[in-house]
Image: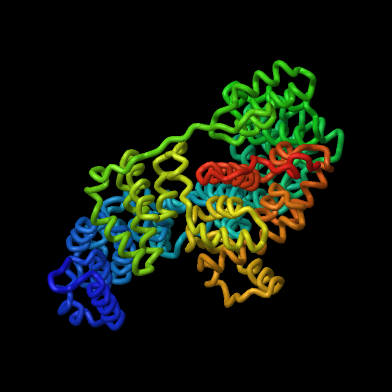
Amino acid sequence: MSAGLDLEQQRKVYETAQDLIDQNDVEGYLKLKGSIESYPLTPYVDYRVFLKQLSEKSPQQVRAFIDEYKSFPFSRRISAPYLSHLYRQEAWPQIVEFQKVEPSGERYQCIFYVAQLQQGKRTAALKGAEHMWLRGKSIADECDPLFSAWEKAGKRTDQLILQRMLLAFDARNGSLINYLHKLPKTAQAKQQAKGMKALFDKPETVAEFAKRQPANDFNRQQAEYALKKLARKDVKLAQKAYQTVVSAQKFSPEATQSLADYIAFRLTRTQSPSLAKWRDAKTETSHDVPLIETRIRLSIQNGDWQGVQKWIAVLDKQQQKSLRWQYWLGRSELALGNEASGKQRLAKLVGQRNFYSVAAAEALGKPVVYSSSATKLDKKVVLPYQKSLDRVQELIKTDKIAAAKSEWRHLLSRVDSKEKAMLAAYAASKHWHHFTVVASIEAKMWDNIPIRFPIAHRWWFDFYAQKHNINPLTMMALARQESALDSEANSPVGARGLMQIMPKTAQYTARKYKLDYKGTRDLNNVSKNIEIGSHYLQGLMEDYDNNRIFALAAYNAGPGRVKTWRERTQGNVDAYAFIEAIPFKETRGYVQNILMFETYYRDLLGADGTFLNPNERSSKY
């Protein structure tokens, strides 16, 4: 640390430095920089200064800065603004000098190729233009000069226009098709483009199209995309047109099966005996794993144990060996009276760290056991990364959590598996709960239960669990699944905080239970998030008679969907079959994970309890 100032004093000077940069007072910052030269976060101020002076920097200076600070996450955030600046200045030589290879990001790729064009690298630029243009969506405006030069050079052929129309068809981009179909120059291409637009607009004409047009790759692609579009719109019409399309256009056996798979998947819930028969016939010859597994789950949902065996047999041998399907084969054998075979199969699954292993143990009345390991922190392994770790520590201390997460991810991206494991252990020693979880996942430390499942925020979980008569371990497991214990987590759809609560759910819950709730930002507060989440979960548990399976499924997918799924099973299946029959992969995995996570927390804390409670075991689903 800098001589004369302790850490707390350096923090204050650092905040002053940030304020000076906010005021564009770079000179003021440089005067006090010496007092925080060794403070871990000072390079973040230097980064801001560099960005402010970016317009004055040469390509060599920018590259040198990126190289000097490559251990910092902000080193990845300099090229884009620099390229944007050079583009605005039309500094083509500097762009070519700075950017030697195609950058990531469509806008910057356009800038890259425009600069090559301006600097006389015409062949590479025009090749890049074709690469950029052949996409099923609109391209960044920065590519317009490139495309203009490419067109003037006679490179935008009718064949390429039709090719891009196919990409737009596949991408379901009607506005782009509408634009492109006006561009061809030859009479034949104009007719083809007009025909493709008509087929896109009215996919129900696909059978007539397939019979009328010559069988070739171009027409087969159109027919495939149109039939798929029709299947999404009216699966019965698609099934009716299917045979005509594949026969008239001479689809290969593989393409024929692939189209059948697409339609069959959309017939999963059909009530028509003839359509169900067609679906099953196509599924029997399929190699599409999601389709076959969906059909197995339909048999599980209906309690059709012979069907379970039949459809598992359609999977390839490796898929059949999975714990999931071995469990269901064992269950089917028990249900069909093959008790010895069923018990023997299930017994082989017991003792593994897996939902189906636990389910097998439950079916056999055996204790739940699983492999577990521990990792001892070796500080020598993480010593080379101490500066990064000091920055993480300081960012957390100063409540710069987003920046701390960025530092952590950047650090993990630069180390090997052994180092990731040691960083997970280091994070655990510091009680950086979310960072511990993230590193353990990156290091694939699947058997290291103590590292993977930190005991975080226990006081608050216990407090609200007792208040609402909920098992605190259920809430801890839910938070671990929802956010990986990240109180600052914000999902793409807007869910926030430890228990990933949607703002509308928070408002509803706060009104219902008369809670003090000031707004969305409250959801990133640990205690407030747990308070609202526990109230909401309590309501679900009450709605479902203390049944976690229904409550957790509703927490993830909504009560309306749970109602639909229960109507399908009609109280004819057990807990495990209901979970397996959940059609959403995310929700199915969500419920399974939380039940397992609660088991791990129960064992870590030496708490009493069983995998399923008596009510969950005896309930009809």
On screen, residue 573 versus residue 319, left or right, reads right
Q: Residue at 70% across / 53% down in the picture?
A: 551
Q: Quadrant of residue 52?
A: bottom left
Task: Identify which residue is drawn at 83% across, 38% down.
Answer: 572
Q: Residue 345: image x %, image y %? A: 65, 20
Query: Residue 474 in the image: x percent, y percent?
Result: 61, 51
Would residue 188 be visible to someone looking at this image? no
Q: Nearer the viewer, residue 184 or 266?
A: 266
Left/right placement of residue 218 relative to residue 228 reads left
Q: Residue at x 59, y 33 (%)?
A: 368
Q: How many marks?
A: 0
Q: Is residue 516 above or below residue 83?
A: below
Above/below status of 338 relative to 217 = above
Where 388 falls versus 584 (above or below)? below
Q: Quadrant of the C terminus?
A: top right
Left/right placement of residue 488 relative to residue 79 reads right
Which residue is at 58% across, 58% downward? Answer: 176
**Spot occupied by residue 475 in the image (x, y as percentages of width and height):** 59, 55
In this view, the residue in front, 507 or 609, is 609
Considering the image in quadrants, where does the N terminus appear?
bottom left
Task: Tell me if I can see residue 314 in this picture.
Answer: yes
Which of the pair 310/512 is nearer the observer? 512
Quarter of the image holding residue 223?
top right
- Chosen colour scheme: rainbow
